[in-house]
Amino acid sequence: NAGVMQNPRHLVRRRGQEARLRCSPMKGHSHVYWYRQLPEEGLKFMVYLQKENIIDESGMPKERFSAEFPKEGPSILRIQQVVRGDSAAYFCASSLLTGLSNEQFFGPGTRLTVL
Amino acid sequence: GQQVMQIPQYQHVQEGEDFTTYCNSSTTLSNIQWYKQRPGGHPVFLIQLVKSGEVKKQKRLTFQFGEAKKNSSLHITATQTTDVGTYFCAGRASGGGYNKLIFGAGTRLAVHP
């Protein structure tokens, strides 16, 4: 049973370009979470999605960032017109259920570097 | 909004010494989870605590959930070099409906042989 998959693992972009980060949850998981982690810092929640729905995007910057989880295919975190401050590790996690008793399984992350 | 604070930020120990990290929430939690992230790796789930005053053990790791369900601790007995990494607590606020996990900033553990 494959775990959470993220690609690319490393992504380099120049300022102003677009970054697309992909996440395939564990098989059978329909809940996906995106987190951002700056170097030597904690995990900051960005967005929570279920299939075709954004449930909570309270941690997502209002501009340039968007996320989707289509009926078919991976979840996508999209960052438009990247700036140097977007450089970070972006982790995706998935869970089987939401509610009181669910653990989140994390992918290996995408390390984004903005030049 | 809900905040989860974790101390200390860093801890350096000699191999064989004990280690404890503490987690405090500004609000009552329905449950708390602990994760470990090795250097360069991704967070890995360790355990979840749900009941007030709950204590769980995993070999040399002891996890506690406070009586008021607002704080938690992770204690490692006789640390080993394999314990190196950052330990995060993550709390879920109590109440109905969806409640996202709020992660603490983590405690980075260094173990010197």
Image (tube, helix red, strand yellow):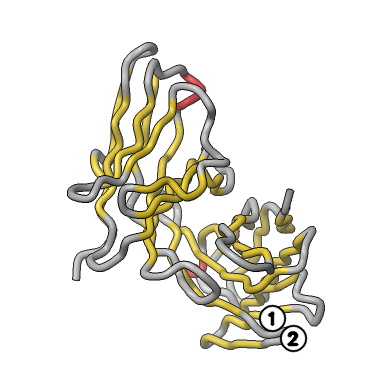
Q: Report the quarter where the C terminus of chain B lies.
A: bottom right
Q: Nearer the viewer, residue A9 or A99?
A: A99
Q: Is residue A26 left or right of residue A15?
A: left
Camera-nearest label, 2 or 1: 2
Give above or below for A83 relative to A31: above
Spatial CA distance of label 2 from label 1 is 7 Å
Which amino acid type corresponds to the residue marked 1 in the rendered image? Gln
Q: Secondary structure at mark 1?
A: strand
Q: Residue B69 is drawn in which quadrant? A: bottom right
Query: Do the residues at discs 2 and 1 belong to one chain?
Result: yes
> Residue placed farthest to the top in the image?
A16
Q: Is residue B56 left or right of residue A91?
A: right
Q: Is residue B110 visible?
A: no
Q: Position of residue B106 (x, y in %)?
A: 62, 55
Mark 2 near mark 1, Cβ–Cβ under 8 Å? yes
**Residue B53, label in figure:** 2
Which amino acid type corresponds to the residue marked 2 in the rendered image? Gly
Q: Is residue A59 visible?
A: yes
Residue shown at 69% from the left, 52% from the top: B9
Q: Disc count in the image?
A: 2
Determine the chain carrying the residue at label 2.
Answer: B
Q: Position of residue B82 (x, y in %)?
A: 46, 69
According to the picture, the residue beneath numbered tag 1 turns out to be: B64
